[in-house]
Image (tube, coloured by chain):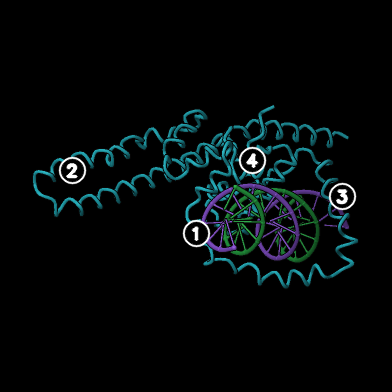
Chain colours: A cyan, B purple, C green
Amino acid sequence: MPNSATAAGSIETTTALLMEELPQLEQHQQALEKDLAAVTERLESVRSALTALQALSTVAIPAPRSEVRADAGEAVQPAVATPEAEPVSEAVPVAAPETETETEAEAAPETETATAQDAPAQRARRATAPGRKSTAKKTAKPAAKPAAKPRQAKKAGTAKKTTAVKAPKARKTAAKESSPAPDNTGGLTDQVAAVLARNGDTPLRARDVAKELGRDDTTGAINTVRSTLDRLVATSRARRAGRGLYQAAPAN
DNA sequence: TCTTCGCCACGTTGCTGTTG
DNA sequence: CAACAGCAACGTGGCGAAGA
């Protein structure tokens, strides 16, 4: 059949073209994501600098003249220096894996430093977590619990649990094994993978990934990201760097 | 019809603060 | 100082929806 031969040829050509285009697209995507991250960080630092400046100006007013000069001069400097330290033009260089890590690390020295420290001290972080204990102790607790009931009804569906317990599992494993290099759906999975890739060797928690994706800080959203991370791990697109820590899979 | 994805809920674990 | 209680985060299992 000449037709099938022609078809096979065109498929090959198209495949080659697409494969050629793929890395470029991936690079472009990463570049855009880096841009977004850089702009976001920049925005944050500008905001905080503005806040600091505004606070300073309010404080400086009642102060005596001679002191005002000294205070303003000294105090303003660091605040102004913050935005200057990371000019946009530098923060936005496209597709520079090394620069990118540095940029991120510098751009968020106060807020997200914990992310970088997560790997060695994931627990210390919890301890550092803002308003975790004494403040929000007995305040916020309920909310998610009540919704558990309808779920229980489902689970209480008895036979389902016992019988279906193994079926889905087997199905999942089979699926994973049968399709070693699956999904290129530009959905959450890819976004999560991109976040991991952006952070290179820095292990991230599901919460951090969710944050980077601009998702809600809710348990549900985080669990979703976690599930996605688990899938990435299962498909070798990511790896665990510890309990609750995920890292981009080493390029093999 | 099957596979994948996203989401939800439950149980477990680890840490911190409080009390005896 | 040790035990207890509370809270947040993590891990896992399961379900429904959507796409191939």
**Along the polypeptide, which appears first: circle 2 or circle 3?**
2
Query: For numbered disc 3, what is the local secondary structure?
Result: helix
A238 sits to left or right of A39: right
- Which of the two discs, 2 and 1, labels the residue nearer the N terminus? 2
- Left or right of residue A198, residue A150 in this image: right
Check disc 4: other Cα within 10 Å, few if <14, some if 14-19, many if 20+. many
Three-letter code, disc 3: Ala
Gap in Å between the C-alphas at discs 4 and 2?
45 Å
Q: Mark 2 sits on what residue?
A: A71
Residue that mark 3 sits on: A170
Residue A99 in the image: state x and y as whole percent.
47, 29
Q: Kindly identify the residue that appears in the image at 79 percent across and 38 percent down.
A: A180
Residue type at numbered disc 2 = Asp
The answer for how far apart the CA atoms under marks 3 and 4 are is 24 Å
Q: Residue A246 carries which label?
A: 4
- Residue at mark 1: chain: A
Residue at which label 1 appears: A134
Q: Are marks 3 and 1 in contact (CB under 8 Å)?
A: no
As helix, strand or loop, the secondary structure at mark 4 comes to: strand
User: Residue at the spot x=61%, y=32% of the render?
Assistant: A23
State how many labels appear.
4
For marks 3 and 4, the one nearer the N-term is: 3
Dot 2 crowding, Cα within 10 Å, few <14, some 14–19, many 20+: some
Spot occupied by residue A41 in the image (x, y as percentages of width and height): 42, 43
What residue is drawn where x is 53% and y is 50%?
A: A211
Q: Which of marks 2 and 1 is in front?
A: 1
The x and y percentages for residue A182 are 75, 42
> CA–CA distance between discs 3 and 1?
44 Å
Same chain, labels 3 and 1: yes
Mark whose residue sits in front, 1 or 4: 1
- Whether labels 4 and 2 belong to a single chain: the reply is yes
Give the percent coordinates (x, y) of residue A26: 59, 36
